[in-house]
Amino acid sequence: MDLAYTPEQQAFRAEVRAWMEAHVPKEPLVTLECKEGFDHHVAWERTLASGNWGMVTWPEQFGGRGLDLIQWLIFEEEYFRAGGPNRANQNGIFLLGPTIMEFGTEEQKARFLPPMARGEVIWAQAWSEPGAGSDMAAIQSKAVRDGDHYVITGQKTWSSRAAFADWGFGIFRTDPESKRHKGLTFILFDLNSPGITRRPIRQLHGDTGFAELFFDEVRVPVENCLAGEGEGWNVAMATAGFERGLMLRSPGRFQATAKRLVELYRAHEAEASPAAREAVVQAWGAAQAYAYNTYAVASKIMAGGKIGAEASLNKIFWSELDRAMHRTAMQLLGAHAELKRFGNGQINQWLEGYIFSLSGPIYAGSNEVQRNIIAERLLGLPRVGAG
Amino acid sequence: MNFRFSDDQLTLAESVRDYLAGTHGPEVLRRLDAEGNRDPAIWQGLVDMGLTGLCVPEEQGGLGMGLLEAALIAAECGRACLAEPLVDTAFVAVPWLVSKGETAELAAIAAGTRKVALPHVLNPWVADGEGKPLQSVDPLRNLVRFPATGSTDDHLLNLGALMSAAQLLGLADAMLNQAVEYAKIRTQFGQPVGAFQGLKHQLSSCAVAVEFAKPVVWRAAQALQDGASSAPLHVSHAKLAATDAAIQTAEVAIQVHGAMGYTYEVDLHFWMKRAWALAGAWGDRSYHYKRVDAAVLGGSQPIGPEHTFA
Ligand SMILES: Cc1cc2nc3c(=O)[nH]c(=O)nc-3n(C[C@H](O)[C@H](O)[C@H](O)COP(=O)(O)OP(=O)(O)OC[C@H]3O[C@@H](n4cnc5c(N)ncnc54)[C@H](O)[C@@H]3O)c2cc1C
């Protein structure tokens, strides 16, 4: 164990810091969940790419810098220190990218990864269906093989940023006789393909951050299938592992929130309750614990280790921490908590953040499902219905 | 930067774990409880493994290891609910004596002929010291009220708190494991109670709490080993995180056991009571909370994403 950064790592931090200070927008961007904000965030993705910061861990040939996970953590820390915006392409770079890296052909990697890293193609994840949320194996949308195409018919829903994004990745039933986890295939598709109708869905905050997708005989070339027909479930499980695991929610994000919470507390110290004070201190501690754990996992992976069901521990921890921090902020704000903008015109980011934090325990596999996974796969308790 | 134990460290911890699992199971705790709490043969076994000399410098006949190894092994002592005063003597007193340059007793400690219980003002009593006996809820803890006042030394307090935190991790792991094993074999309504989500989710929450307390304790051990100025904060953070995880796990574990958990017959109570005792030892929750509060809200500790290891 060595908890000091090398001179090279320190130099790298300084390089990221200088770039971020020069480029991160001074004012927070309008929320990513509406068209205007989405466009600003996409523009930011391209600015990032201009500095070659799109996805620092990827190999250079795919638009990355070939950096290791400790450098990635340093990058993320500096990104959030500078107040870097949410990543419009998070479902591309953090979920689909690593999946293509693992399962894609060389052609698919060359075709999809560089434009993703450059922020030119923004991706939406289209897995959930009205009848298949937690129970993803209940997917019904079909992809029927017709020569060198699949013909997709069905419906996907709650697809984040699908109202505005360029491409989607989904799982479809390619074997009509199949049930549950079998006969599913992972397919990438252009959201502007003929036959796709997007219906934006207003979220809790009122903006259309996700969308419903209707597929009416949408033709997709077979080369857009990832890892072969019928492999969809296995591929999706790998993607879900990336989603819950290391990358989607790096610690810097929560450490930055904890820091802002401390500042908010100081501004409200006179009227704050002792319980709120303790919650603020706990927030710092939990955000730090999450950071240490991420460094530990990164170190383990760099030494050749793997993470599996442990990713579920992570997902519960960060999502419940995020909700707790924002709940505390709402308490500290008191009567001001309900204002969408404060008297000085500033957006109430705590309110936006609180609303968003309520979705953390739902998306990426609900926390109840994560607790089932921990109980059954890590602790070895009997499966539901065992008797 | 590398947040990982070396293979040697992990092998060492594993060998202690295996040794204690083989020689210090629940039946031994019951025997000790019935027959007077301490057994020279157990102590001698620890001495033979070199554990009393773990942190004693090589010149005095020890292994010359640091606080990271000591904390790892303290966690194993917690897992086994070890009652012998190994942690207080070898992982608290020894590093403290070494830090003060007091080497006179080290060889005897390494050889296992000398046990040391250092009193600190924050602890109104010590285990395995000399003085008027007191009864702890932990049946295997030999408490005494010592005659003189204790030390006010912060480093001693930090060592004691760190090693308590490490033991609490092992205790929590063991309690979680006991509860899981019980939930697999106890059947009601025609199925193992561990198949019920009401229990599964509580146990999973314990797993989350314990998992995220661990790196906080290791980080504190490294900070104290390095003599970092922020070490007291990290030790207090570790004590808080480990205490909260252990107390939560103890409460869930007894619930999972049902009425069996409320008996003296089920093993769980030894671990649970040790956790209660260590939660208050070497600075209780309020004490350590206040130290973290003062550093974080008082502004002495730099905070934010770029200060993960400040
Ligand atoms: C902000 C947001 C963004 C999203 N983005 C996307 C996206 O980009 N792409 C996409 O495909 N999907 C997306 N989703 C959908 C998300 O994946 C689903 O919401 C999630 O899988 C849960 O499914 P559900 O909403 O149908 O809830 P349900 O499955 O209906 O669950 C309802 C409740 O029942 C509980 N429950 C369900 N099964 C169990 C069980 N076995 N044991 C115990 N409790 C259970 C759940 O935990 C929950 O509390 C998003 C959701 C949100 C909120």
Image (tube, rainbow, N blue to C red):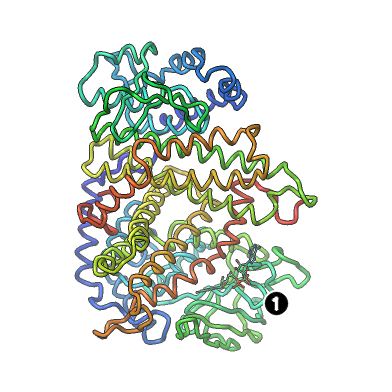
Identity of the residue drawn at 70% across and 52% down? B195
Residue A194, placed above or below residue A118: below
Identity of the residue drawn at 26% across and 23% down? B97
Q: Which of B234/A127 is in front?
A: B234
Q: Which of A7/B14 is in front?
A: B14
The spot of residue B66 in percent (x, y) is 32, 29
Quick check: B177 left or right of A17?
right
Quick check: B193 left or right of A91?
right
Q: Is mark 1 within 8 Å of ligand 1?
A: no
Identity of the residue drawn at 24% across and 61% down? A16
**Can residue A143 be seen in the rendering of this structure?**
no
The spot of residue A301 in percent (x, y) is 44, 47
| Furthest-right residue in this view | B190
Q: Quadrant of residue A282?
A: bottom left
Three-letter amino acid code at the position of disc 1: Val
Identity of the residue drawn at 36% across and 27% down? B91
The spot of residue A383 in percent (x, y) is 70, 53
Q: Secondary structure at mark 1?
A: strand
Quadrant for ligand 1 reads bottom right
Q: Which of B242/B151 is in front?
A: B151
The spot of residue B248 in percent (x, y) is 51, 48
Quick check: B294 left or right of A363?
left
Which chain letter goes with mark 1? A
Q: Quadrant of the N terminus of chain A?
A: top left
Residue ID for mark 1: A144
Residue B188, placed above or below residue A93: above
Q: Residues within 10 Å of mark 1 (few under 14, many from 20)?
A: some
Residue A34, placed above or below residue A173: below
